[in-house]
Amino acid sequence: MAAPANTESEEENLHSTTSFSDREASVLLQSQESTAVKKENASQSHSHENTDEDEPKKSSCHLSISEELGSCRGLDNHSEASKHGILLEDGGENKDAPLKRLYEIKASAEKGLGVFAIEDMKRGTRIMCEKHLLSTLCKDVSQIPATFASLSPSAQVLYRTLSYPKVNLRDPATVTSLHDHPEFLNAVASMATEDHVIIMAIHRVNAYGASDGSVICLEASRINHSCVPNVQHNWNSRLGALTIHAVRDIAAGEELLTAYIEPCRTADHRRQALNRYGFKCSCTACEDLTGHGKASSKRRSRVQEINRSICLYSLFPGLSPFRTNKQALHAVLEAIKLLEEEEIQTFQVLDRYKEAARFSFNVGDLKAASLWQEQACEHFAASFGKDEEGYEPIWEVLQNFITIRDARRAKWTWRWIDRR
């Protein structure tokens, strides 16, 4: 739906009520532009300096079989790994090439097992690319036990090594507190055996969303939660695999953490959402109850408020607190700044970059629109990979912005030449 038209005076009056000033927006835009230039220069410098010997190797998931939940045995080649559903990052062009393992699975304090980096990783590194151990391609969760029964005996043993809340799953009150979805409650109530209930519980707390269903990936399911994640999980439908990417630089020995829930909520709302997993989050955003923790909760609440307002402005402008594209743009830039302060690099940032590009275009700032869309492309590639199907549409919008921007520049250049 098109944004409502406004006169210049109305836009100025409405803009005076926003908390993000023109000066702050300009500073943020200059910061993003400077960052983009630095990345481009660094990339060019790196491409000249690299030799065949020091060219970074491509990474991929490398499945290991847990023996009695202790040590992990690595698989040595693609043919062996393919038995357990592992993909090379490059799509497997060299079928006999050894897989580059960037992580290990070991005990994590108060969390059972966790996944840890065994070497430094740059933002955008694809850490895992893992085929599913079990897949449900529909929303009918009552079919999970039957799907489990179709697995090979060895796959069933691996499935059972995954953790689940050690509670009485037959107790209605307990199940209700852990699993808020009616279909899960109905399915558990109809389970014939206790074993079926356990199978359901393992799936409930270890599955990742995938297309129209969900998947269990043995190693990716070992990744623990944080409300300040350092990796992004995503089901890549083109590869038919779950990918894990570093959303910031990760040091060797650091635990890999993803967000099981939407992190832009208050601490109380996040704790409630995490009940289904049967644990209490101990990340810095949840544990810090001092002034910093309260400020963090306030910033995240503000981001959530802006998200709702932008959604209303796009769908039902009359219900939104914004009345102009300029006012909506300033709110989006405020959200980007708050997300940076919270060190959140999830899809929330990607959505805000795209919105910043759209509203910048709507107000006629093609330079800013191109910059923000370029940031969206870079963020998408770093978090999901360029082989994810959603990358092309974002890239095409960027090319359109650049084409329009360059055409406008050429038009003004010829006008200036004619005046000379």
Image: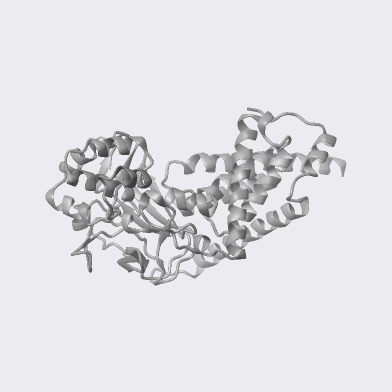
Q: Position of residue 180 (x, y in %)?
A: 38, 41
User: In this rendering, does residue 158 appear at all?
Assistant: yes
* 5 vs 360: above or below: above
Q: Tell me residue 364's x, y (percent).
A: 73, 39
Identify the residue at the far left of this view: 153
Query: Is 113 on the left or on the right of 323, as rendered?
Result: left
Q: Is residue 364 visible?
A: no
Quarter placement of the C terminus: top right
- 173 or 201: nearer the eye? 173
Judge from the rendering whether residue 100 lies leftward or rightward of residue 56; answer left or right: left
Q: Tell me the residue at 47%/63% (across/down).
A: 283
Q: Which residue is drawn at 61% across and 30% down?
A: 315
Left of 159 or right of it: where is 404?
Answer: right
Give the colour scheme shown. Answer: one colour
Q: Is residue 113 left or right of residue 54?
A: left
Q: Is 241 or 106 nearer to us in this picture?
A: 106
Q: Which residue appears farthest toward the right when viewing the image? A: 420
| Image coords of residue 159 (percent x, y) | 22, 52
